[in-house]
Amino acid sequence: MTDLRMRTKRVRLTPMRRLRILIDQRMAGFNNAKLISPEFISDMISSYEKQTKSLVRNLLLGSIYLAIMFTAYSGSGVKIAILGIDFSDVPKLLEISVVLFSFSLFGAGILFLNQQILIQSIDSMISSVVPNDDLSQGLIKYRYAPLINFFSPFQASFRNEGETISPVGITRVFNAIMAWIALVAYFSIFLIPIVFMLAFVVPSLTTNVVSIGVGGLAWACSCFFICSLMVLILRLPYDEILVDDLPPNKNEAP
């Protein structure tokens, strides 16, 4: 009987990477039980596409709520053509727009997490049935990873090793500039509206119980949305349990 030795190793992983490792461990049992079929994977992909459409719709609604919040905060006398009244005449418009935008942030965070969990499950299923070689697994790895796909055209290396062509000189400068511009643009799209709401709009609300509650809701939903994005980026420490085979005892009889 083979002796086993268990040891603990401290590793730093993103929460989504940890989830993928756990999914892969459970998917091995499903694959051995022949529970993974092309039809089941197809249904999962269909669910992922529906989640993507829902996320896009939520972001579009969020942009509308943001525009209303900016108009209400700036106090511009924009009229609602259908109703024939000014924005400033709508009672509690600023508080209502903050609540709606906060709900859209919370909904976007939920949809984003569901989408990422779903796609990790799909890729784990595909990885368990395709050949276990670098090319096949690499195609799956780069297929849906949001940040990797977004920055891969401007990265110095795509496969990280074994490349036959690599950028030099002005190409490296161009890649570095584009990567930074893309990174700033990616986060500005989400962070600038949140900073505008938390740093300018929320403090401008009148100090009463309703305004304090609206401000707390805005902070809670904003923090949840930012954390939902950070699960792909933030590397956190985890304890990984490793099992090693002990060398055979020399004094043990064959």
Image: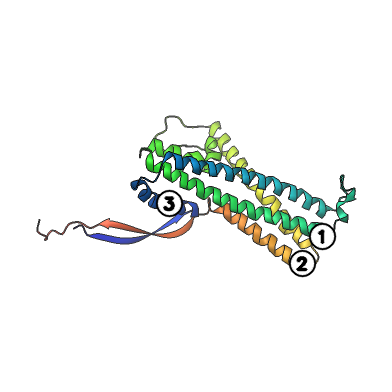
Tell me: 28 left or right of 57.
left
Q: Which mark is residue 178?
A: none
Q: Is residue 53 above or below residue 165?
A: below
Mark number, residue 23:
3
Circle 3: element type: helix
Which of the 4 quarters of the picture holds residue 186? top right
> Could you tell me how far apart the alpha carbons at marks 2 and 1 are, in whole angstroms?
10 Å
Gap between marks 3 and 1 measured at Cα: 46 Å
* Labelled disc at residue 210: 2
> What is the CA distance from the residue labelled 3 to the residue labelled 2?
43 Å
Horizontal relation, residue 214 to residue 112: left or right: right
If the image is split into quadrants, where does the N terminus sit? bottom left
Element under disc 2 = helix
Please provide percent x and percent y for residue 230: 56, 53
* Residue located at (55% from left, 51% from top): 114
Q: Residue furthest right?
A: 84
Q: Can residue 160 be seen?
A: no
Q: Residues within 10 Å of mark 2 (few under 14, many from 20)?
A: few
Camera-nearest residue between 131 and 39: 39
**Furthest residue to the top?**
165
Camera-side residue: 188 or 69?
69
- Please say if the residues under marks 3 and 1 sit with CB atoms less than 8 Å apart: no
- Please say if the residues under marks 2 and 1 sit with CB atoms less than 8 Å apart: yes
Query: Visible in this render: residue 41?
Result: yes
Q: Does residue 246 lie above or below 84 as drawn?
A: below
Label 3, residues with CA under 10 Å away: few <14, some 14-19, many ≥20: some
Which residue position is annotated with label 1? 92
Q: Residue at x 75, y 60 (%)?
A: 202
Residue type at numbered disc 1: Lys
Q: Residue at x 50, y 37 (%)?
A: 156
* Marked residue nearer the N-terminal end (2 or 1): 1
